[in-house]
Image: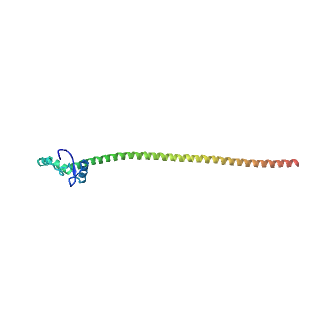
Amino acid sequence: RQGKAELRLLSAQGAVVSKDRKALREILDCLKICVENPVCVLDQENSKHFIRGKAKEKYEFFLKATEIQQVLTKIRSVSEAADQCASDAERQRGRLEGYARAYNQAKEEYDEIERMHKIDQEIIDLKAATGWVAVASANKAKQNAQTALNNAQKFARDAQAVYEKEQYE
């Protein structure tokens, strides 16, 4: 430093490589150096607090150095997320049961409609069969009437023949 608050990354030969904080952050991340961790970088002020500190302050220093507090925070957030997922799953299960009931009801209605459609088709078929039975019955009656007419005509011819025969004799 030369009276300025500037950052310079230097090569092994002392040449300036970069003045960018981003480059420094990339190097620290690559080497997994956590500057905020007091165990990695213990400056004079923090070492004084650690040496003269009370047990509670030393415990807080320990939590910060081992990053246990961060882990506990992550565990809590994951636990809360898991609880939220469980409650969401339970709510969705309730919805699913409702959908299952609606499906079953719709299926029953569909089956009933399908059964009614079959009955309607049977009625149409029976009406058609009834119509053909009526046609067949009419044809049979016509045939019987025709036979009776033919028999009557034959009887009339025979009777006329007998009458004419008796008239000539």
Counting from the top left corner in percent of width and height, residue 140 is at: 68, 49
**In the foreground, 31 or 87:** 31
Q: Residue at x 36, y 46 (%)?
A: 92
Q: Residue at x 54, y 47 (%)?
A: 119
Lateral position of residue 76 relative to residue 52, left or right:
right
**In the foreground, 28 or 145:** 28
Lateral position of residue 126 relative to residue 106, left or right:
right
Lateral position of residue 126 relative to residue 101, left or right:
right
Counting from the top left corner in percent of width and height, residue 152 is at: 76, 47
Q: Residue at x 48, y 46 (%)?
A: 110
**In the foreground, 22 or 154:** 22
Lateral position of residue 62 relative to residue 74, left or right:
left
Q: Residue at x 51, y 47 (%)?
A: 114
Counting from the top left corner in percent of width and height, residue 84 is at: 31, 46
Q: Given the current orientation, which residue lies at the most extreme left position?
A: 52
Q: How is the image coloured?
A: rainbow
Counting from the top left corner in percent of width and height, residue 29 is at: 25, 52
